[in-house]
Image (spheres, rainbow, N blue to C red):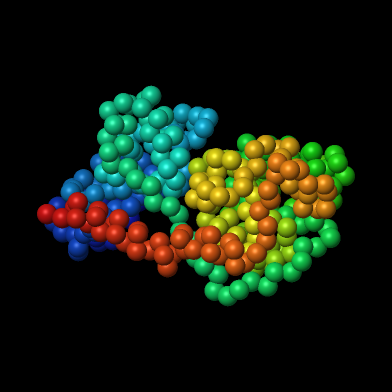
Amino acid sequence: MALARRIRRALTGSATPDPTRLPAGRPHLLLALDGMDVAVFREATADLLEGIPVWIYWHDSALGRRRLSDPNRAALEASSARAADRLLFNAEGHRQRFLTALQAIDPAAAAMGAARSATLPPGFSFPTSSPRLTAPEAMGWFLWTFRGDLEALDRLLDAMGLAAAKGIDFRLIALSEDPPRAARALERLPRPLKARLFGILHPEDPEASRWAARSHALLETDPETRSPIWTMTFAARGIPPWVPEGSVLAELLPGLPAWRNGRELAEWIEMERGGAASASSRIPTRGFTFWLEALRPYAWPALAARYDASMAGGEAEGAP
């Protein structure tokens, strides 16, 4: 395992086990991210890291999804959950779904996981200065977060197709941490909707911030467990997040209106573009001060102490 070899080299100067090389210090706690095979890692480093607690932070998981679509990943997650000392989740709904799915695979591991798990919400960096919001342009720009999930793409297609059929004018800027990969996935867009996709940008690209200042909202169409950090970052700049029911951000901000289906999202777009309002809908609106205050509990200046306290508890677990 590459990570095990890198850690061994960092601590002993050699990537291969060598009983004559003693580690130059050892960590108090190891924090793994989702996707790592913790059982294999612990086996590969047993002689070096024995007694050091290993925690997993789950931003996303196959077991935590509403529909199991990757049995191999689910099996790896179950194995890792058994091998870890503590499981941290980005939202309580994610934690509950994960443990329920794990119960069907390994009841003993699920019982152990329930006792060793907790929720620790994701944090994000506050904007360093107040953004310069401009009035949304007549063209109708919307940002859209795309993480590669095809179900999220289908949900976008549903809403955009309905909006386009009504003759509503809108354009999209897709945000992706891997723009080339996103471009390949978005080739499946129907030609009329592909013509409305102006570009694909990394969220850290300065162009993304410039387009955000001119956009009506940031669309989220992934209802699953994935991290909403970029959505939170743009919301703190005054761009309202339009999220589906069941999303992590809807859990973190209980009062946040969330759309229920593609028809309602299309209705929100229509209303934002000047159409008739529906009495059943409340659209999140733009505003730097409001979103900054709503998200303040999840900004690092406030959340860091909570993370530190949690990690300090891990150090105590690993103390001799």
Check the picture and name the quadrant holding the N terminus. top left
Q: Is residue 191 left or right of residue 284?
A: right
| The one of 293 and 107 positioned closer to us in this rendering | 293
Question: Residue 304 at x, y = what percent?
Answer: 38, 63
What residue appears at the point 58 percent right and 50 percent down from the top-left corner? 256
Check the picture and name the quadrant holding the C terminus. bottom left
Question: Residue 191 at x, y = what percent?
Answer: 82, 42
- Snapshot quadrant of residue 95: top left
Q: Is residue 281 visible?
A: yes
Residue positioned most to the top: 104
Q: Is residue 227 left or right of residue 45?
A: right
Q: Is residue 34 visible?
A: no
- Snapshot quadrant of residue 292: bottom right
Q: Is residue 293 above or below residue 254?
A: below
Residue positioned most to the left: 320
Question: Residue 262 at x, y = what percent?
Answer: 71, 38
Question: Residue 265 at x, y = what percent?
Answer: 71, 43
Q: Is residue 305 left or right of residue 139?
A: left
Residue positioned most to the right: 167
What residue appears at the point 62 percent right and 47 percent down from the top-left corner? 257
Q: Is residue 274 left or right of residue 312?
A: right
What residue appears at the point 73 percent right and 37 percent down from the top-left corner? 263
| The one of 290 and 122 positioned closer to us in this rendering | 290
